[in-house]
Amino acid sequence: MRSCLILLGMLVLPALVCASDISIERAVAAVDNGIIVVDADAELNFSADAIAALESGVRLVFTLDIRIRKPIRYFIDRTLFSTRHRYSLERHALSDQYILTDLITGDRRIQGSLAAAVDNLGRIRHVPVAERDAVDLPAESALRMRLRLDIESLPAPMIPIAYVSPGWYMSSGWFQWQAAL
């Protein structure tokens, strides 16, 4: 029994050392020119494995999932609309700069350091969700958002390793708030 506990400790300790995480600190939704837009602030902590891969030229893709839900008392909320945005973060080897790209619009932001690029990735601004008139919303809607690393977008040889290594699980979980749209 004691050897099993030691073995379990040896497996868990590296996972805690290499832990990575994303947390959404705040989010707001508003209507701008008939379009529902979202702003949010997230804090990202990369594991040593993710940093090493990025420094070696591996592109990391992050997915931002946004859902508009209708709160139903005593029942599970019903999803009225769902959308997904994707961002990639990569290091340019020759210039030693980091490029953050919105994979939907193609907008690119270039940063001189990894810390600045990660901070920029965490500042989610003016993300279009849906046309206000296209979605039949109640006066008070529940919005949910999560930001996560897309493991499936890693190079094929890295995917199995990422699935078994806790250092690659980067997800904020669902952040929910109420908004009058």
Image (tube, rainbow, N blue to C red):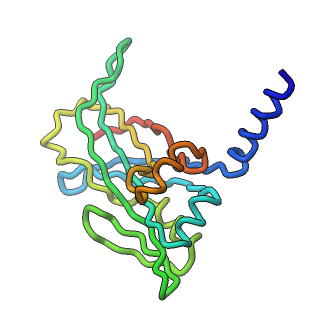
Which residue is situated farthest in the top direction here?
74
Q: Where in the figure is residue 88, as x and y percent of width and height?
A: 39, 64
| Above or below, comparing residue 72 to residue 148 in the picture | above
| Left-right relation of 64 to 81 | right
Can the viewer see residue 123 in this picture?
yes
Q: Nearer the viewer, residue 13 or 30?
A: 13
| Above or below, comparing residue 29 to residue 55 in the picture | above
| Left-right relation of 84 to 16 | left
Q: Residue at x 32, y 38 (%)?
A: 67
Q: Residue at x 75, y 33 (%)?
A: 8
| Left-right relation of 85 to 119 | left
Which residue is situated farthest in the right direction here?
2
Quadrant placement of the N terminus: top right
| Left-right relation of 168 to 69 | right
Which residue is situated farthest in the left direction here?
134
Quadrant placement of the C terminus: top left
Q: Where in the figure is residue 26, as x and y percent of width and height?
A: 50, 48
Q: Residue at x 28, y 24 (%)?
A: 78
Q: Where in the figure is residue 154, as x and y percent of width and height?
A: 43, 57
Q: Nearer the viewer, residue 99 or 56?
A: 56
Which residue is situated farthest in the bottom direction here?
94
| Above or below, comparing residue 83 to residue 123 in the picture | above
Q: Where in the figure is residue 134, as x and y percent of width and height?
A: 13, 41
Q: Residue at x 26, y 54 (%)?
A: 128
